Amino acid sequence: MKKYDVLIVGGGTSGCACAYIAGKLGLKVLLIESNSYLGGSMTSSLVIPAMKTSDNAINTEFFNALYKELEKEGGAITYSDGNKGWFNPELLKIILDKMMKDVNVDVLFETNIIKINKKLLSYTVTICNNNLSTWKSELSSCIDSINIVDATGDAKIFQNFENIFSDKNFKIEFLENENKTQPVNLRFIMSGVNSKEFSDWLLKFDNNRDVSTACTIDGYAYFSTAYTWDTNTNWALKPLFKQGIEEGVITEEDSNYFQIFSIAGTPDSVGFNCPRILNSNISRTEAYIKGRESILRLSKFCKKYLKGFKNAYISNIANTLGVRVSNRVKCKYVYTSEDLKSGKKFDNPVLVSNYPIDVHSNAKNNSKLEKVYQEYQLPLESLIVSDNLFVIGRSISADFEAQAALRIIPSCFSMGEGLARYLAKTK
């Protein structure tokens, strides 16, 4: 039986950061991932770029190392606003493999947990490859780990604790959403875009630099712009969307949220943070189908109404939905929006940020992007579930509005790294 200091379930943003730093600090780490690649929302859901956060952020070694490795391969840029989070999602898969290998992290893809047995000072965990037609005990394997970290993004290990944990006295509490939710989206990429033509047109068409920006890096044009159907904002792109709806190219629902970014290292490709799928009552299967139907319409809209998109085509559709709201585990400390807004200080912070409270809505003029006027911290205690059990990523112990500020990629990097440093100190 292999023995590890820490088992991390989920190779997404927080999980990769935790694994890399823990491995670099000398811990024996096993990282298991249900997909065939690492990166989580960045690679599977095409959530790029990472949003810009505080210049005083802590636990950023992983972020900086990732940027450095990607930049070597032409897969990362620093945008004009100083944001280093503009990554290439496909190169990211390769670089994350390399980084885990560099610090001796063991990685298992297409793998899931069957059972967790509590021992005196550790856990025996039964794992199995997802591709088996049946989970046969003789084909599964067991490992022993002192610590277990749920980095699945939706607390999948703790959500299913009654079936996974052998200790029937073990209980997990979850925080209530109070019927609050945020719409999911299904991102995609279009290639064949004349980025120079589009960025030149964009800067003339929209003079609001809080919405539309462009710059030249290494001789290539990079840009960003947005539009929503909210009527309380004067969007420059509004006449084009109105025309697209009137001419039947897109539906009004297609126009509810539109945001695009260039992609590092691929000057003819554009990433779409849309479509946003409004009906939260439909199944995930229906959401995928509805999302792909909308993607086709949006691609035709871009080709018809946006300069530089004439020869563009859909080159990638996300494998998974972009999820903003997760199951949230109740840990030693429940972090609140009051903590966040007041900038409450803690003895053991794992991150420092100033990203706003960002709540998406399925109704017009009902989304919320509330600025915070001072930096805030997240305490380590919001990651500690119980003895040697931890949660990182979207599922941390925070209320609905606080989680809406903390769910961004740089913050997930920091909380994963912060936990790794804690585990190394307490080994």
Image: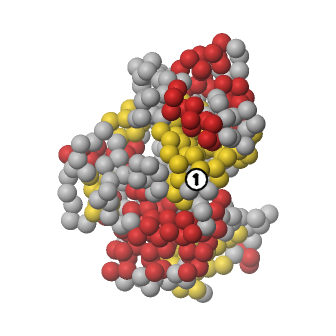
291 is higher (above) or lower (below) than 322:
above
> What is the x, y in percent for residue 418?
36, 68
Q: Residue at x 66, y 46 (%)?
A: 269
To which quarter of the image does residue 424 belong?
bottom left
| Dot 1: element | loop
- Spot occupied by residue 302 in the image (x, y as percentages of width and height): 67, 30
> Residue at the spot x=62%, y=26% of the render?
254
Residue 353 located left or right of residue 297: left
Q: Nearer the viewer, residue 168 or 205?
A: 205
- Identified by mark 1, the residue type is Gly
Q: At 47% across and 56% down in the image, what residue appears?
A: 78
Reply above or below: 340 against 391: above
Residue under pointer 1: 219
Furthest-front residue in view?
219
Let me know if residue 321 appears in the view: no
Report the residue at 59% width, 50% height from top: 220
Residue nearest the viewer, comparing 259 with 344? 259
Residue 379 in picture, x, y percent from top left: 28, 60
Is residue 250 in view from this perspective?
Answer: yes
Assign the N terminus to one quadrant of the image.
bottom right
